[in-house]
Amino acid sequence: MITGNSDWFQKLETLAAWLLAFLWAAPLLYAVWAAFHPMDFVTRFDPLAPLTFENFRNAWKVAPFARYFFNTFVLVTITLAGQFVLCTMAAYAFARFEFAGKELAFILVLVQIMIMPDVLIVQNYQTISSLGLVDTILGIGLPYMASAFGIFLLRQTFKQVPRELEDAARVEGAGPIAVLWKVYIPLSRPTYLAYGLVSVSYHWNNFLWPLIITNSTKARPLTVGLSIFGAPESGVNFSVISAGTLLAVSPLLIAFLLFQRQFVQSFMRSGIK
Amino acid sequence: MKLPVQKTAHIYGWLFLLPAAVLMVAFTHYPVVAGIFASFYSTPKAGRLQRFVGLENYSSMIADPVFLQVLENNFIYALGVIPLSVTLALFMALLVNKKLPGRSIVRAAYFTPTILPMIAVANIWLFFYTPQIGLLDQIGSLFGMTSHTWLGDTQTALGCMMVLAIWKDAGFFMIFFLAALQAIPPELEEAALIEGAGRFYYFRRITLPLLMPTMLFVLVNATINSFKLVDHIFILTKGGPDNASSLLLYYIYEVAFGFWDTAYASTLTVVLLVILSLLAITQFTYIEKKVHYQ
């Protein structure tokens, strides 16, 4: 291959990469522009335009963001806690015990990887309603706690733990629960981190189910709050909507920019079988 | 008395599985079965109990022009979004897998839409599409184009959704290709280049075949996404105009929680479940058998 030709090709690639990166970053950068400038400058890109925090103050006043933040925070915390406990136990059962009906049970678990609670909104609403959990944060999180994806991921990890470690613990008199607690869980930390990041991102961003199950500020998470706030009927201008949107995404976005590598690797792990 | 090891394993196995099993049956298996049953009954209304109606819900579904339209929309949406987002994802992965000035910034830019909520980005995109004052029309006016109601036109509303979905998903799919590319030993490329193989030849004959398992994994996920993610519709169009941008799951939501016709919503859900099951079968049979040729 001729060097000159290859050089030219490389420049073209770099240009394409940066052009795509600009297109992909543009909507967010644009929201930042709109949020920090008065409405008059929304489509006038004047580098000398005055900066302002007024839009953030307005957004905070118009909608109960503090409450939405609290609700989302509680939602992702209890959902993740539930998932950790339930999925750990189930994964342990699948990885280390031979019990009747194991194969069938595992196939039934895998069904949920394809058919998630997200699409079963009609019947799940009736179930949550009969449990009296409509308009509660627990009602939003409950259908997601027994996560097939979590069970699958942890089972794979547990299976890689050397049997000798378990045997050593057993010789010292540890029962099944102590073995799980002292051997399997500590050795699976990276998987818990990966699963935790994916789960928190998913539930921070989830919208349809929380929309269905909540009907007041009491339980509404950020996404549902944002959809009410951003609706044209609310009469809020675009600068304020941008500010509110940035407020809602900022915790996750900042975490992502700080821990980019962990985020990307977590999402990657979650897809590799 | 000490139980034999075999028996305790059964007991422990089931005890550990039980809590997850109960919740999973309650929110995944039960609703599937209950939904299928409900599709053969009428919706219970005030003073009227539900009754068995056989296939009546299904026959009215086939005669429902809105159902046929959302199904068609969903297939158009899938056929537009999937190939484009997957191709772009592969292209992005190839770009950032090489030495590149500012590589980590470029990679972060591609991936950022993945971690933002669809609702939040739809709020921003809504403004792009707004007639006259929106960014799209502002840019268009620089080139002498006339203003267009992008989201209010049956010709363009679904397309606007598709562009947003492609932008949102491409960076997510990119990371799976990137992982697969990084697993290819660099010696392969060196050897191929020494043998005189060109860039495109190497890509077509070496890289692409090695990426096939990842490609199919991504394709199945992209297809699932196109049937289960409808958040942007709530912000951008609410399915309009004239259901031109409505998708199947959004229609299920409208029927179930707008018209409270749970029997019909269950019938529509059965259709969605059939589509998802076909995908599952594709993944488990076709992919597992034919792609791992080692």
Image (spheres, coloured by chain):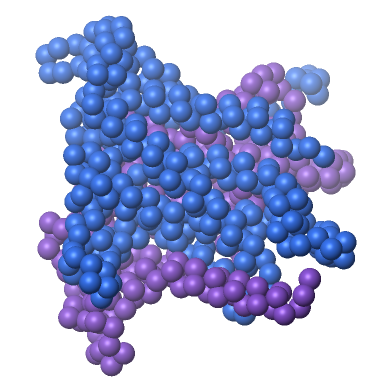
Chain colours: A purple, B blue
Q: Residue at x 71, y 74 (%)?
A: A6
Q: Residue at x 51, y 26 (%)?
A: B277
Q: Residue furthest bottom?
A: A48
Quadrant of the rendered structure where residue A12 is? bottom right
Q: Residue at x 47, y 58 (%)?
A: B114
Q: Position of residue A160 (x, y in %)?
A: 78, 45
Number of numbered discs overlaid on the protein picture: 0
Instruction: Tell whether A59 sits left or right of A88.
Output: left
Q: Position of residue A150 (x, y in %)?
A: 58, 43
Front residue (pair A97, B201): B201
Quadrant of the rendered structure where residue A49 is? bottom left
Q: Position of residue A145 (x, y in %)?
A: 48, 40
Q: Is residue B131 above or below residue A14?
A: above
Q: Is there any visible trace of residue A189 in the rendered image?
A: no
Q: Is residue B5 above or below residue B159?
A: above
Q: Position of residue B123 (x, y in %)?
A: 28, 60
Instruction: Tell whether A84 sits left or right of A177.
Output: left
Front residue (pair B89, B277): B89
Q: Is residue B152 above or below residue A124?
A: below
Instruction: Tell whether A102 sits left or right of B268.
Output: right
Query: Which quarter shows the C terminus of chain A?
Result: top right
Query: Which quarter shows the N terminus of chain A?
Result: bottom right
Q: Residue at x 23, y 14 (%)?
A: B42
Q: Is there any visible trace of residue B137 in the rendered image?
A: yes
Front residue (pair B120, B223): B223
